[in-house]
Image (tube, grey):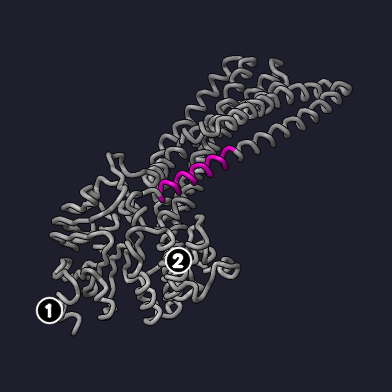
Amino acid sequence: MKKYFKKQLKTLCYVVSLCSAYAVFNVGIAVLLQYVVDLAAGRDMVRFVRAMLAAGAYIIIFAGIYYAYGKTVNKLSNSMIADLRNDLFSGILKKDYESYVTYDTAAYISTVVNDINLLESAYIAPCIRIMENSIMFVLTVILLLRYGGLIIIWLTFILCLMMVLPQMVGKIMQNKQNRFSAQLSSFTRVLSDYLSGYEVIHTANIENTIIHKFRNENTLLFLRKNDRDKMRSLSDSVACLLSAFMQFSIIFTGVFSIMQGKMTIGILTALLQLCNMFTMPVSAIMQDLSEIKSAKPVLEKIDRFMESAKEKEVCSIREIRTISMKNVSFKYPSQKENTLEIEDLQIHCGKKYLIAGKSGCGKSTLLKLLAGYFKEYEGQILFDGADLKQTDDRSIYQKTAIIHQNVFLFNASLIDNITLWQEYQEQDLENALRISGVDQFADIGNKGRALHVGENGKELSGGQRQRIAIARALIQKKEILILDEGISSIDRQTGNDIENRILNIPGLTIINVSHDLQENFLNQYDEILFMQNGKIAEAGPYQELMSKKGAFQRYITS
């Protein structure tokens, strides 16, 4: 967090200056009270009226300084939070795929929204208050020296008692804060899950069940927060008790001194004011330090989310001619057995490949490995001889486009979802719309630009969403197009037209996973890879595989 304070150094300097002025005026109230009370006791009406007018002007100036100070503190805090949130979001998006999918979306949302807000109240605000109270304490000590050292000795004794408590409850507070933060993250994750599953909940008529489960989560959140707040209240109550004991001891001592003629009423009033300014800042500082300590797990979580992939020697790929897989095996972290085992596979750029096989045989996993999504595998995946593990992901993404069966669309216009807010020639856009079939329900004119697709394209059909994804890939003119059931939601006639147009794009490498195997298209693919149990059982042109009368022939004719 230090770098965010440094980043706002100019505003921080303003805060320190205004904080110092605020502290001086705040401590100065004690001197002002002493003067006014002594004038009242001396029945000097003329000087008393003058003092009251001066006090009025003093208060107005003090209020102005306080307003400027509070306004500047808010600006500093809000700027730091905005910078931190920007860096956190950038860090999340720049993670590699494997690191990103370690956490679910709700966990990221909870951190960007809830934990950042928690950090503002549990770290930034306490840091500013510590600075404010430290200045206040120093000025108070200087002023108290005017009234004798015994007062400071007694106040220091009371202060030591008040400092013991935060040390005792600090670890307990941190533990309860950790539990509250974890429950808040769980609550956000559950809330996101239930709201995303609205359609399933509604159609399955399980609203009452989900409401009951939500109430249980909400009750746990209440209990965790209440548990933390009870400990905080206990700490504050004991500190308040000690503070009251200190004040009464000063009052009794001061009244006794007044009765002996050794102190004026004005001095006693000033001492009472200064006593609060002596003990309360230190007590507040100790509580704020405990608050900052309790925020440590939140900071660590944010650091993990902002952490990028480890720096390593990487190479960029300028041109892809071949992609090869040699003795590659891969399994997901939650699985014990390999999902994929590929002994030898050669992809020659410019050719068309079709991957076929039953559901669960590893087709999608193979595509994700070829697209560079995963790096934790055994064996070698080579792009023109360059090891994928040592290759810059961005250089692969610049040359490959992958279209999934479930297409994600931004809550923006149709054209923005195709161009992804990049500038393209109108001719290129028209060509992408034509090949993908988007031009059948939209155009690049005002109608197309004004057409808003809604949250994740809810205003469109599944087939329309897939056509937009195809247009999105084509307009970028990638060298390799990977389709994972990329036209499965499009009606057969339209899908056939789109597939035919894509297959006839010269120089484009196509790696297509499809269950809709039609003979007139199968002949257009240079090679068919038939998969079984995570392995490539057979590979070759369509006619060759059919003549073998092996696993592929049995699969397609069954």
**Would you say 137 lies left or right of 318 here?**
right
Between marks 1 and 2, how big is the CA–CA gap?
38 Å
Residue range corresponding to the magenta coloring: 76-93
N-terminal of the two: label 1 or label 2?
A: 2
Answer whether residue 79 is magenta in the image. yes
Q: Residues within 10 Å of mark 1 (few under 14, many from 20)?
A: few
Q: Is residue 171 magenta?
A: no
Residue 249 position, x and y percent, is 59, 27
Count the marks: how many? Answer: 2
Q: Is residue 307 left or right of residue 219?
A: left
Residue 482 vs 493, above or below: the answer is above
Q: In the rendered view, does 508 fall on the left or right side of 17?
A: left
Main SS category, magenta section = helix
State the quadrant of the C terminus.
bottom left
Query: Most extreme residue toward the bottom, as rendered?
Result: 558
Which residue is identified by label 1? 547
Type of amino acid under label 1: Ser
Extreme residue in the front direction: 506
Give percent across and percent down for residue 552.
16, 76
Residue 251 in view here: no
Furthest-right residue in view?
A: 46
Q: Residue at x 59, y 30 (%)?
A: 10
Residue of label 2: 432
Q: Which mark is residue 315?
A: none
Residue drawn 18% across and 62% down? Answer: 340
Q: Position of residue 397 (x, y in %)?
A: 35, 54
Report helix, strand or loop for mark 2: helix
Question: From the viewer's perspective, is residue 297 above or below residue 29?
Answer: below
Q: Quadrant of residue 257?
A: top right
